[in-house]
Image (spheres, rainbow, N blue to C red):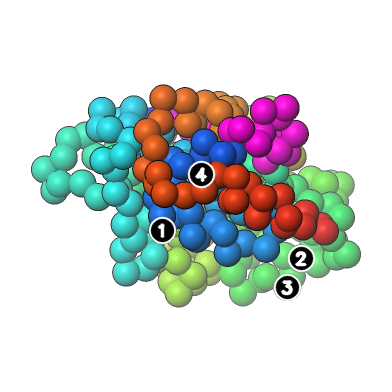
Amino acid sequence: MKIRWAISLEETMTSPNFQNIFRKAILCLSETELEYQKKFRFKEDALACLIGKLMPRKAAVLHTNRQWNSLEFVKNKSGKPSLRQDASSVPRFEYNVSHQGDLVVLATGDTRIGVDVMRIDESRRETASEQVDSFKRHFSEDEIESVKGGDKSDLKRWQAFYRIWCLKESILKATGVGLPDGLHNHIFQLDPIYEHIPGSSTTSSLYFHQSIPQPQWTFEESYIGENHCVAVASESPSKEFVPFEMTTLSEMIDEADFVNVTADPDEELDAFMEKPNKPF
């Protein structure tokens, strides 16, 4: 089972039933998960954390047919979270979560998987070309050319920059090695004919690790809405593309079991509502 879900933070917080949904969501988190989300200063980050903990639980229930409150999530030495499963569990449940801008996204499968989402942000002080210059140690010459080359608008250059960034982050998250492996070691050969814009999708990008082709990986690239670029890395050569589906926090906890019955939902809601919104 392959799931691709996305949830809007703004739509969640402006829902007329948000406070009741939040209260129930609190009870569906483990004590550890609840304590972790409380650490965030801003509403958006705390809510993204809460949603990012609940999405894998909902997906795991669908994937494994296990009960919500029987699921246990752990982290490996690199800090990558996973569902605790028996070595013989079939099918395997692998997942990854990303949140940036207005979206929290989840991608699942039965092999190693990573996802990254970025909002196209033209409000930065620098241009896209200046941005890629400051990050040039992380990019190949061809990747830099895909951003800076040709006669195109700065929006197109930003789209190209965020596309490459999402690809690199998705493979780092899929492998679980993170930044210590170095973004410069992960190079992508892009289809020169394909134009990555809202409404488009592709699995054509080729991946090289330290200049060695890695054909066992597929990269699903698309947009969610008009301004969120997303990439999913999965350890499968199938080149199958699975589109993202917009969903809601309410749908995530529908039919969910309470995990932390000692939590005080009203107290947690009050603490959340007192947090400031992000100033940017």
Q: Residues within 10 Å of mark 4 (few under 14, many from 20)?
A: many
Circle 1 residues within 10 Å: few <14, some 14–19, many ≥20: few
Q: What residue type is disc 3 on?
A: Ser
Tell me where the magenta segment starts and ends, as one range.
3-21
Residue designated by label 3: 134
Kindly report the distance in space between the C-alpha atoms of the residues bearing marks 3 and 1.
Answer: 38 Å
Instruction: Give the residue at x 66% y 71%.
Output: 136
The residue at which mark 1 appears reads as: 32
- Where does residue 110 sit, x and y in percent of width and height? 29, 38
- The amino acid type found where label 1 is placed reads Thr
Task: Name the residue beneath numbered marker 4.
Answer: 26
Position of residue 36 relative to residue 111, above or below, is below
Instruction: Tell me what residue is drawn at x 43 percent, y 71 percent.
Output: 181
Q: CA distance from mark 4 to mark 1?
A: 12 Å
Q: Residue at x 81, y 57 (%)?
A: 280
Q: Quadrant of the N terminus?
A: top left
Please say if the residues under marks 3 and 1 sit with CB atoms less than 8 Å apart: no
Gap between marks 3 and 2, in whole Å? 5 Å
Residue labelled with disc 2 = 131
